[in-house]
Image (tube, rainbow, N blue to C red):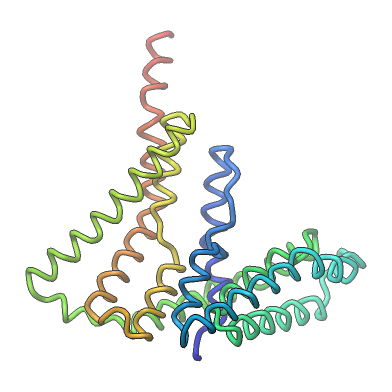
């Protein structure tokens, strides 16, 4: 099975950006999306049958338990000896990342979940922060464009040349934006969030991110979707991700206008 195992680092980039924006709303952003059980089961079930799916699920659960209960205790002393980052820290991180990705791939789960689970087990502290700062430029400048290039090589937009295909693509993009955006806004409002925060949540959660590209690439490789649908879904993932930050900024600016007007009237 051939995959780009660095997708987990790219996904972390998207999550970190969204988390920073959520912090401006004073909301704790959960990191459960990349490792959600339903996505793991779906990806695992694309193998050779139920036995493969159960093997993948059991292996993933075992690795998750290992990362939650054992690895943090083993890694904490190694990263707590000094606040100065050393070459062995970076080497150990990369080796563990590759092993985790290989293990998940061998178990029948996409390698991205190995990287995600390993990230949850890494000890938090100055050394880990410096490792992240060292690796992030390589991830953003080199690996992120490579992954988009990988998806772009499989995207054939010539199949969308007809008017009916264009209408279908526009309909899917519009439906995806309205469905997820409105649902997230409604859920936030029903949970007691104010209008401003609900708009911010809807704008950010509307972004499909790189996980969407990973899933549809697997679907294309397994023959579950055709090239035309793959191209449409790729456009949807890219458009919703790119528009997340501008839409968030616009939603917060729009939501602040009534408050500004009320303050002016009081003054």
Q: Position of residue 39 (x, y in %)?
A: 49, 67
Which of the 4 image quarters holds residue 251? top left
Q: Residue 50: x, y in percent?
A: 49, 80
Note whether 223 is above or below 184 in the view shown.
below
Q: Quadrant for residue 119, please give it.
A: bottom right
Q: Residue furthest top?
A: 266
Q: Residue 136's quadrant in the figure?
A: bottom right
In this picture, is 254 found above or below 141?
above
Image coordinates of residue 201 in percent, x first then y, are 45, 43
Give the x, y percent position of residue 99.
69, 84
27 vs 227, left or right, is right
* 26 in relation to 48, above or below: above
Q: Relative to 93, is 189 on the left or the right? A: left
Q: Who's the residue at 90% across and 68% down the image?
A: 77
Residue drawn at point x = 48 percent, y = 33 percent: 191
- Horizontal side, residue 22 vs residue 229: left or right: right
């Amino acid at each position: 099975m051939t995959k780009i195992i660095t997708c987990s680092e790219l996904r972390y980039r998207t999550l970190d950006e969204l988390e920073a924006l959520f912090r401006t709303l004073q909301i704790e952003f959960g990191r459960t999306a990349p490792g959600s059980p339903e996505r793991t089961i779906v990806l695992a079930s694309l193998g050779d049958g139920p036995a493969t799916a159960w093997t993948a699920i059991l292996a993933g659960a075992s690795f998750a338990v290992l990362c939650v209960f054992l690895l943090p205790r083993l890694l904490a002393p190694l990263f707590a000896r000094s606040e100065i980052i050393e070459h062995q820290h970076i080497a150990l991180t990369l080796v563990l990342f590759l092993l985790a990705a290989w293990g998940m791939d061998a178990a029948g789960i996409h390698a991205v979940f190995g990287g995600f689970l390993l990230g949850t087990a890494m000890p938090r502290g100055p050394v880990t922060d410096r490792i992240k700062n060292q690796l992030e430029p390589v991830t953003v400048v080199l690996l992120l464009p490579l992954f988009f290039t990988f998806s772009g090589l499989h995207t054939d937009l010539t199949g969308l040349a007809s008017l009916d295909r264009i209408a279908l693509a526009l309909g899917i993009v519009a439906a995806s934006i309205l469905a997820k955006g409105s649902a997230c806004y409604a859920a936030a409002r029903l949970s007691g969030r104010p209008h401003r925060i609900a708009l911010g949540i809807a704008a950010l959660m509307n972004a499909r991110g790189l996980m969407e590209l990973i899933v549809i690439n697997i679907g294309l490789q397994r023959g579950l979707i055709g090239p035309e649908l793959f191209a449409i879904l790729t456009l949807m993932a890219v458009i919703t991700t790119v528009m997340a930050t501008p839409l968030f900024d616009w939603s917060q600016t729009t939501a602040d206008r009534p408050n500004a007007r009320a303050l002016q009237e009081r003054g």
